[in-house]
């Protein structure tokens, strides 16, 4: 009884070893590609100004994470796991998270657009949605306006979708 069990385990191990070895190689390849892509993008970012540098560093993290996720799914497929259900589940999860976080994602994308196109800069005086103030900080989610002792955090999606009055000193 034990001999047949050990023999069966030996056959299973012999059958799975090449698959696991290939999966490890695939995962290692994607990990190396992820590291190289991240380093290349960060190196490109080093030669740019601060706002674009920030955006490129964020892009480097996203590309690196996407490559690692794709490599993990590919490695599981190499082992023999049916990944179609996993991929469908990831797609549905991404859709649900995107729908649930649409305002946050809208502000994030608007913040990236503001940092890339720079319709205004720090220390500019702007007016938007009836609020006027000096721009003291531009973040991915909010832009900070200060007027006197008051501070306003304006969601970046409002800055993209509304008219901005720019009052630059002459």
Image (cartoon, rainbow, N blue to C red):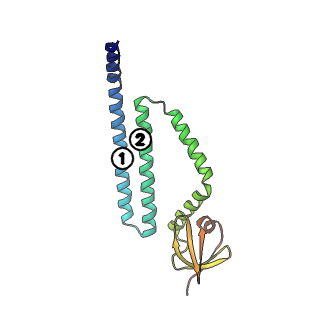
Image location of residue 60, percent across then percent down: 42, 56
* In the image, residue 19 above or below residue 163: above
In percent of the image, x 42 and y 40: which residue is there?
Answer: 72
Q: Determine the residue located farthest toward the front in the rendered image.
A: 2
In percent of the image, x 56 and y 73: which residue is there?
Answer: 144
* In the image, residue 136 above or below residue 95: below
Image location of residue 77, percent across then percent down: 44, 32
Residue 80, located in which quarter of the rendered image?
Answer: top left
Image location of residue 84, percent across then percent down: 52, 33
Mark 1 / mark 2, whichever is N-terminal: 1
Q: Are marks 1 and 2 in contact (CB under 8 Å)?
A: yes
* In the image, residue 152 above or below residue 24: below
Closer-to-camera residue (69/121) = 69
Circle 1 or circle 2, nearest the eye: 2
**Mark 2, secondary structure of its residue:** helix
Residue 135, located in which quarter of the rendered image?
Answer: bottom right
Residue pointed to by mark 1: 33
In percent of the image, x 44 and y 44: which residue is there?
Answer: 69
Q: Which mark is residue 148?
A: none
* Quadrant of the snapshot with the N terminus: top left
How far apart marks 1 and 2 lie (CA) works out to 10 Å
Residue pointed to by mark 2: 71
Image location of residue 124, percent across then percent down: 54, 79
Category of crowding for the residue at label 1, using alpha-carbon neighbours closer than 10 angstroms: few (below 14), some (14–19), many (at least 20):
some
* In the image, residue 60 above or below residue 84: below
Closer-to-camera residue (53/11) = 11
Q: Is residue 62 left or right of residue 149?
A: left
């Amino acid at each position: 009884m034990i001999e047949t069990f050990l023999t069966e385990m030996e056959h299973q191990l012999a059958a799975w070893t090449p698959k696991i070895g290939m999966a490890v190689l695939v995962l290692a390849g994607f990990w190396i590609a992820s590291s190289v892509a991240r380093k290349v993008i960060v190196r490109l970012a080093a030669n740019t100004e601060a706002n674009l540098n920030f955006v490129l560093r964020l892009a480097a993290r996203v590309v690196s994470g996407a490559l690692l996720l794709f490599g993990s799914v590919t490695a599981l497929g190499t082992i023999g796991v049916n990944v179609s259900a996993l991929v469908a589940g990831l797609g549905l999860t991404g859709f649900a998270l995107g729908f649930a976080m649409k305002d946050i994602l809208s502000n994030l994308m608007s913040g990236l657009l503001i940092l890339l196109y720079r319709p205004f800069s720090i220390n500019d005086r702007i007016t938007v949605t009836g609020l006027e103030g000096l721009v003291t900080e531009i973040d991915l989610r909010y832009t900070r306006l200060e007027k006197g002792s008051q501070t306003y955090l304006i969601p970046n999606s409002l800055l993209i979708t509304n008219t901005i009055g720019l009052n630059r000193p002459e």
